[in-house]
Amino acid sequence: MLSSFRALRLGAVFALFGLATSAISADDEAQKQDDWIEMFNGKDLTGWVAEGIKEFKDKEDQTKPVWSVQNGLLRCDGKGFGFLRFETEVDDFTYHLEFRMGKDCNSGIGIRHLKYDMARSTATRPSYSGYEIQLLDDAAKDASKTSTASLYRYVAPTANTVKPAGEWNSIDIECIGPKIRVTLNGKLIQDVDQSQIEEIKSKPLKGYVSVQNHGKQIEFKNLKLRKIKS
């Protein structure tokens, strides 16, 4: 009888412990979700700053914005050159977004860069002042220092896993200290420690994130950012 009673007590303790553990895990998961900043509300460009070329003339000579919201998507109609920069500066972070390119798309994702100033164009471009993660309509082509998911002009990805124009792609970028990881469509293709590469070791560990207009159409959705506490 005593042994049975003890077993029941132990079972109750384990059950309570299991419930407590589950509750903690649920709280941790909720906290992780709360850490994400929804960057795009699907309605307007609140929280974003257009830099560089902001307007263009259509075929009817009507002035239109390069960056707009259409059907809940963030759309770049690709005229001229410029960026749409998120207003919050960050150091360590995870940046997630999904993109769908038009034919012959040329675009990019800026990370850890300065504000773009057309008067000092080259020096303040993300690819110089920080990094540009290249986005191109180059599915099935060889990976290089200028292919999709390259740290443009500096580091080639290990593979080119981008999907063709018209299909949705998912990309995750993680920056922690000097380490940069890029996962495109579920495959890790950049795992870089900039402190070990002479050409980029002095690049900043803090700055802005953005998406690029480089003369072609592209759409984005599900843009979100999670700051990481070092």
Image (cartoon, rainbow, N blue to C red):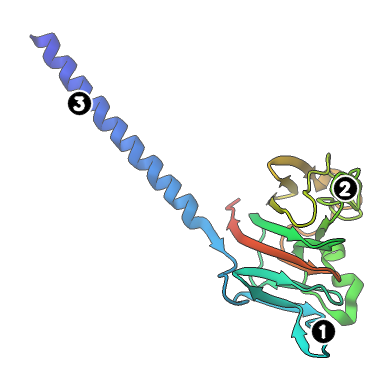
Q: Name the residue tied to disc 3.
A: 12
Q: Quadrant of residue 125?
A: bottom right
In the image, which is nearer the foreground, mark 3 or mark 1? Answer: 1
- Assign a secondary structure to mark 1: loop
Marked residue nearer the N-terminal end (3 or 2):
3
Q: Name the residue tied to disc 2.
A: 155
Q: Residue furthest front?
A: 60
Mark 2 and mark 1 residues within 8 Å of each other at the beta carbon? no
* Mark 1 burial class by Cα count in 10 Å: few <14, some 14-19, many 20+: few
- Assign a secondary structure to mark 2: loop
* Mark 2 burial class by Cα count in 10 Å: few <14, some 14-19, many 20+: many
Q: Residue furthest left?
A: 1
Residue type for callout 3: Ala
* Residue 6 image offset from top left, x and y in percent: 15, 15
State how far apart marks 3 and 1 are (Cα). 71 Å
Name the residue nearer the viewer: 189 or 197: 189
Q: In the rendered image of this protein, does residue 81 appear above or below residue 170?
A: below
* Mark 3 burial class by Cα count in 10 Å: few <14, some 14-19, many 20+: few
* Residue 21 image offset from top left, x and y in percent: 35, 35
- Assign a secondary structure to mark 3: helix
